[in-house]
Structures are given as C-alpha cells and as structure tokens.
C-alpha cells in the first residue's frame, strides 16, 4: 500500500510540474494578483489531489482547469465580500456602519417582497437561470450543462430575465 501511495504521489508531482504554468495562466486573469494566484494554484492542486480517486479518466487538462476556475472564482468572491464588509464597517467595529430607520426597513422589506413576487412571475426557464446564476453562484457553463442548452442561450435568458424584472419593479413604483 505504501508503494502504491508513493507511485500516486510521484505521478501527481509530474502532473503538477506539467500543468502549473498553464493553470497559473487560467487563474491569473481572475485573481489579478500573482501572490494570491499562487495561493489559488496551491488550493487547486490540493483539491485535485483529494479528488484524484474519483477522477474517471478523460482530459486531465480540462479537469484541472475546471477546478482552477472554480477555486479562482470562489477566491475572488470571498475577497469581494471581505472588501464590502470592510467598507461598511465603522473604524474599529465589525458591525455595519449604517442604522436604518423604521421607514427604511419597511421600504426595504416592501422592495424585497415585490422582488420575490416578480421572481415568481418569471417564466420558469428564466427564473431557474437567474436564480442559479445570482443566488447559487453558478457559472454560465454550469447552467448550460445542467439545462442542456448553449452558453449563448444562458446569456439570453439572463438578459431577458433581468429586463422583465426591471420592468416589473419600475411598474410597481
């Protein structure tokens, strides 16, 4: 068993050497910081190593690229979320900087209710695409694969769904 693990580690080391430059080129446009991109690259290879037993063959370059893109997007989202939290916090505090009045809270709740109703009124393909992208954080490619459609169709559905929502929200004003 030790021999088998040693062989697996050697094989994986060759994969790392072969694809690290390519994967860095995939990650860097998303992350835009070479040091952070190195961290994402390391996370990518750690995830790939953990997932290696479930790899069913096929194009390993595509498989690694998929892992790298997901890790990079997740990293970018986390960074953006942290940036927003920092901008909203008072100096020295972790709490949001603004306190809403009762009227503002009511208006926010009312807008949320109108948005939820407008979402329910969307045609099912548009609603599934929009919620998958905006709420679940799925990529265009993931949505296309799940629905059995092209990426271009996903783009069209998102555009139309947003346009319908905007019209419905404006009509309610």
Image (spheres, helix red, strand yellow):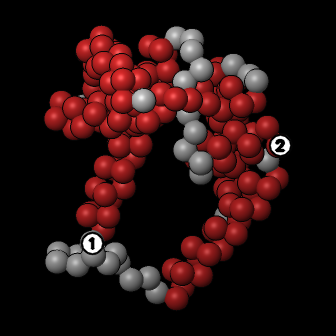
Against 14, is 159 above or below?
A: below
Q: Residue at x 64, y 67 (%)?
A: 112
| The residue positioned farthest toward the bottom in the image shown | 102
In terms of depth relative to the viewer, which is nearer, 99 or 32?
32
Q: CA distance from mark 1 to mark 2?
A: 39 Å
- Name the secondary structure under disc 2: loop
Which callout, 1 or 2, points at the residue further toward the start of the chain? 1
Label 2 crowd (10 A; few <14 / some 14-19 / many >=20): few
Which dot marks residue 89?
Answer: 1
Image side of residue 70 versus residue 15, left or right: right
Q: To which quarter of the image does residue 40 belong? A: top left
Q: Is residue 65 left or right of residue 20?
A: right
Q: Quadrant of the N terminus?
A: top left
Name the residue tied to disc 2: 123
- Specify the quadrant of the image occupied by residue 36: top left
Is the residue 143 above or below the residue 134 in the image?
above
Location of the C terminus by quadrant is bottom right
**What percent of the width, then of the height, locates residue 58?**
57, 12
Residue under the image location 48 percent in, 27 percent down: 52
| Vertical side of 87 occupied by 147: above or below | above
Q: Is residue 50 above or below residue 155?
A: below
């Amino acid at each position: 068993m030790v021999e088998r693990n040693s062989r697996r580690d050697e094989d994986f080391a060759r994969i790392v050497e072969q694809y690290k430059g390519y994967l860095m080129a995939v990650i860097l446009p998303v992350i835009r910081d070479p040091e952070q991109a190195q961290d994402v690259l390391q996370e990518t290879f750690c995830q790939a190593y953990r997932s290696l037993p479930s790899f069913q063959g096929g194009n390993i370059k595509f498989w690694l690229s998929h892992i790298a893109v997901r890790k990079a997007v997740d990293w970018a989202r986390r960074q953006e979320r942290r940036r927003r939290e920092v901008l909203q916090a008072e100096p020295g505090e972790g709490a949001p900087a603004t306190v809403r009045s009762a009227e503002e809270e009511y208006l926010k709740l009312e807008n949320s209710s109108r948005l939820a109703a407008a979402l329910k009124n969307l045609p099912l393909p548009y609603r599934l695409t929009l919620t998958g992208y905006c709420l679940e954080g799925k990529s265009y490619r993931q949505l296309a694969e799940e629905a059995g459609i092209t990426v271009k169709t996903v783009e069209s559905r998102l555009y139309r769904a947003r346009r319908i929502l905007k019209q419905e929200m404006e009509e309610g004003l």
